[in-house]
Image: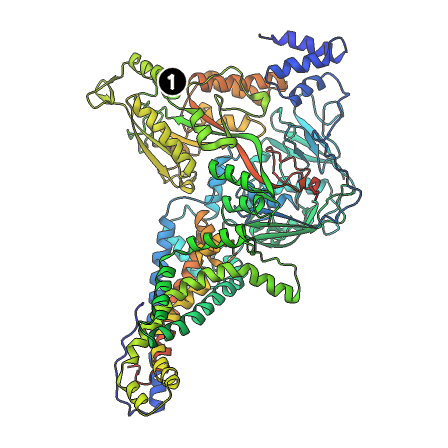
Amino acid sequence: MPFLISSPFVGEGEGKGEKREKVYQYLLRRLLIAVPTVLGISVVLFSILALAPGDPFEELALNPDIPTEVRLHLRQQFGLDDPLPLRYLRWLTAMLRGEWGYSFASRVNVNTLIWQRLPTTLFVLGTAYGLALCIALPVGVISAVKQYSLFDHVATAFAFVGHSLPTFFTGLLFILLFSLHLGWLPFIYSTTLEAQGLAWITEHLRQGAMPIAVVGLFESASLTRFVRAAMLDVIHQDFVTTARAKGLPEWRTILGHVLRNALLPVVTVMALQVPGIFTGAVITEQIFRVPGIGSLLISAIQSSDTPVVMAITFVYAVLVVAFNVVADLVYGLLDPRITYA
Amino acid sequence: MRLEEYELREWVRRVTHGEASRRDFIRTMLGFWLSGPLIAEMLRTQTSAMAQGRRAVQPTFTPTRRGGGGKLRLLYWNAPTILNAHFAGGARDVAASRVVYEPLFSIDPEGEFIPILAEEIPSVENGGRSRDGTWTIWRLKQGVVWHDGKPFTADDVIFTWEYAIDPATAATSRGQYENIRRIEKLDEHTIKVVFTDPTPRWYLSGGQILPRHLFAEYKGENARNAPYNLKPVGTGPYKIVDFKPGDVALYEINPHYHMPNRPFFDTVELKGGGDATSAARAVIQTGEFDFAWNTQIDKDVMERLEQQGRKGMFRFTTGAWVEHIDLNRTDPWTEVDGERSSVKVPHPFFTDPLVRQAFALAVDRRTIAEQLYGAAGQPTSNYLNAPRQFASPNTRWEFDLEKAAQLLEEAGWRRGSDGIRHKDGRRMQVVFQTAANPVRQKTQAIVKKALERIGIEVELKVVPSNVFFASDPGNPDTNSHFYADMQMFANSLGFDPQGPMRQFVSWESAQKANHWAGRNFIRWANAEYDRLWKQAETELDPVRRAALFIRMNDLLIEDVVVIPVVWRQEVSAVSHTLRGLALSPWGSILDDLAYWYREA
């Protein structure tokens, strides 16, 4: 789990207004720290990308009919021959103006490319994470409540298998089974479906089924274990025993007291995974030809289209920093014992 | 059997005057490995009866109406990222733009010229070509309209040339316009291309024609801002509907296309992304797609797919791709004036012809071709393999380690106690580099094993291909620096070998002084070769010019400048239902898309 700011316990006697004010102060402080963090990340990213060898003109080199001067001229035009600090400053000023860079391969601004890809990535990965949550929560809760039962053993086994199988393997397995053997599902994701209305929805679900299942199952495996562990932490605490002793029905004890408290770390983990929804699943998108941000990233890396790589990795970095702040704030909302000193 | 030039000319004269059998002549010429079109060209210089611009492979299907063919689904796993061929990063972009834009002509697999935006193919007889090769007059097709309804005229052709040669535009197509001095407008539908130097390449007039009325304000520095780079307006058989770079291009039929009853399909989808193997599967096994380009995959997988798949098959396009090994003529391990592989320091042993021959004998081309390439490649003794009139009949290759070892002994290289050959205190060790690619790594291993058996120590080096082929003067791992003893890669040699064969002329030596922009990476220098190349540049007689190139190729092989390994073919996966595809290697593979149709 990435850096969580320590949250010391403070007595409960403080007033609400005072607390809200503290939240704002805390937020301001965190945002001020975030600026140099993001800048530092951008320097590191930019340097690594700029120092990486190779240029985007590989295929032009294979054709001896294209004079080398053309490639040298393009290098100059794209500013690849300028000194590194100058290139970084140019990138930074453009970024501050809201220009994310200029793709060498498509000769358009990178934001155009990213906006084109975002809806697909959000649909596929958003659904996948939703699916992961739908599986992980009930399975994790039941596993914890009925610890060491047959259900718990089976769920644990599945979670371990699911977590150890990489997505490129399950992806290919799914294609082999559902597309090639059974012929049920298409394995090439299309963004140009012509169907209307209900047919459009079913087509979307059909082609999305495999990538969503692959990512969703993989994520649910680790999340299930996490929910289970968090539940077990709480379930043996005194207030749960007290709740039971008071005669509360078992389901109310579990949902109202155990789960609510156990959700705290789970929410943090989920919040920290949100940046991943925006930046896509590189491998799964590549296998199923899902035109999301992950596949944009990988093809940009392959063709040395550095402005695109820079933009995507930078957006990811910003999102990670931002959601860290969000996670910490949510933590405090869920647990009144936590204050922002 | 040898045929002297004057005898040949006399025979051509007799054939064209009906004094000798045309069939005998063609048969003999085919025996000389001359291609059909070249023979036709030989006879054409004498007669004017030759029909012009005919499709060599006549499609049997003649549609009676335009459209009605449903959707055509194309898969380019290497996805197109821009729809302006003048900014193309590779063949994928040229192809995706070709659906919308058209050039003046295309070249079919047989080497025949097919007019597209030209009314006819210029020839000396129809007054379209000067006898001295200084100009070409193109008569443009009349009544052609751009997708936005504006008429296509000579101004568009001239503008496209101006656009592409403007250095500020930074077009990748600039090389196609070399040697054009100016283009004159004779009337609304006639242009005259005037060359700087007389040239046998009378057809040089560049690529896909852009509409002047839209691109005029996006020439030079402003070219990158043209919205039409992603939303093209052309004259082609299909119009763009939607384009997402790196993902998909969707086209619809052009109802005003200038060829009657064409095209056949109502919409075309060109999807990108993924990998070659699953692209082949999508066509051959599941039939989700009709055509997949560049499906060069592992030979075993390819054979298995062909057996299992019922929806399609692999089609091979014989172009001029040759996988070859270069032997460095300069010393990569001594630095002089801040550069290694300097022309001032000769290589310690590759300067000895016996050693070079020994290396050539140690390359088992048959095993490499059969085990690694299968149907997609064949062993070759020539650097220049296609078009067929340029393929030399004079060269041979063999794999003989004993003979190789014997040559090394003769050259004075004796095995030391460690099994490695020595001479004058120097060990025979080489670094062999190539671009990362599974097939190339296996080839490297085969070559290494053979060389080790004759007492040569080999160190293999693999460079990522975007680095190996980069034009970065600061990176020592590029193929133009060639800081190794041997290197292997493949070139596409194209329809005319003039440009590609420039890679071996002495003044192109890649070195620090020219920022390694020279094309001669081997740094070989041969006065005869230089002279032949210059002569070919202005030689107007096609037969004599072919002979010049054959001689150039023979020099490369005799002197073991390069070791050609495999003559590669381009592989596509094609649905069983598709018809009318010619798949020409000489332009874009989608050049004849207007002719494609489906038969259930």
At 33% from the left and 83% from the top, the residue drawn is A335
- In this rendered view, identify the residue nearer to me: A224 or B173: A224
Quarter of the C terminus of chain B within the rendering? top right
Q: Residue at x 35, y 53 (%)?
A: A47
Q: Position of residue B153 (x, y in %)?
A: 74, 42
Q: In the image, residue A124 lies at what x, y percent?
A: 50, 63
Q: How is the image coloured?
A: rainbow
Residue B598 position within the rendered picture, expressed as x and y whole percent measured from the top left: 69, 43
- Left or right: B415 with respect to B575? left
To which chain does the residue with label 1 belong?
B
Give neighbour class at mark 1: few <14, some 14-19, many 20+ (Cα, 10 Å).
some
- Whether residue B212 is visible here, answered yes or no, is yes
Q: In the rendered image of this protein, does residue A77 appear above or below residue B404? A: below
SS at badge 1 = loop
Q: Nearer the viewer, residue A273 or B371?
A: B371
Amino acid type shown at disc 1: Asp
Number of labels in the image equals 1
Q: Position of residue A54 (x, y in %)?
A: 41, 44
Q: Residue at x 38, y 78 (%)?
A: A330
Looking at this view, name the residue that lies furthest to the left.
B417
Q: Residue furthest front?
A: A150
**Would residue A321 be visible to someone looking at this image?**
no
Which of the two residues, A174 or B414, is positioned nearer the viewer here? A174
Residue occupied by mark 1: B400
> Is A271 placed left or right of B391 in the picture?
left
Quarter that holds the N terminus of chain B: top right
Residue B360, image quadrant: top left
**Image vertical order of residue B578 relative to residue A38, above or below:** above
